[in-house]
Amino acid sequence: MIKFVMCLTRRSDLTRAQFQDYWRDQHGPYFMKNADIMRAKKYVQSFTVDTPLNDGLRESRGMLPEYDGVAEVWFESEEDLMAGMSSPEGQELGAALLKDEGNFVDHAKSSAFIVREEEL
């Protein structure tokens, strides 16, 4: 299996709570209703916790500020992901998801990539 990972930064006009509420209550259910079109097998939203621990982690390592959340979507293979995204329905859904992300995500400050998990 492979995983599509998005590290998300909220739009500057939203609080973290507003970002998380929209992502959880609007975008997430919309994606899940259509997950079969994209051939997605699993979808997980990880919400960043407001804690001084994040400041300590960032400062101790000289890192950039934390993201507001991380989305993970599992697929059987790259080929399966590409097939789901390239179908007419997948292209239509992809465009709709991207448009909806504009309601809560700052794409210029976010990141997306494909990974393969290796459990140790």
Image (cartoon, rainbow, N blue to C red):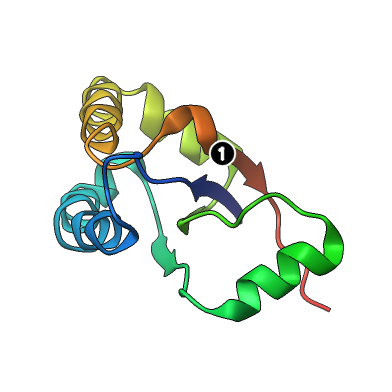
Image position of 74 (left or right of 90) = right
Residue drawn at (51%, 46%) of the image: 6
Residue 88 at what x, y percent from top left? 25, 19
Position of residue 32 relative to residue 48, above or below, is above
Q: Give the quadrant of residue 52.
A: bottom right
Task: Compare residues 118 and 21 and report the one nearer the observer.
Answer: 21
> Is disc 1 placed on a helix, strand or loop?
strand
Q: Is residue 93 left or right of residue 11?
A: left
Q: Residue at x 38, y 46 (%)?
A: 10
Amino acid at circle 1 = Ala
Q: Is residue 13 above or below residue 33?
A: above
Measured as percent of width and height from the top left, residue 26 is found at 14, 54
Q: Is residue 88 left or right of residue 76?
A: left
Classify the position of the N terminus by image quarter: bottom right
Q: Residues within 10 Å of mark 1 (few under 14, many from 20)?
A: some
Q: Number of numbered discs present?
A: 1
Q: Is residue 116 above or below residue 117?
A: above
In the rendering, at what x and y percent does residue 72 appear? 49, 57
**Which residue corresponds to the image point at 23% horizontal and 27% vertical from the top-left?**
99
Label 1: which residue? 112
Give the residue displayed 83% in from the left and 68% down from the top.
60
Q: Quadrant of residue 90?
A: top left
Instruction: Name the image quarter holding the C terminus.
Output: bottom right
Residue 62 or residue 103, whichever sits in front? 62
In-front residue for pair 17/25: 17
Taking 77 as reference, is 70 left or right? left
Residue 17 in percent (x, y) is at 27, 64
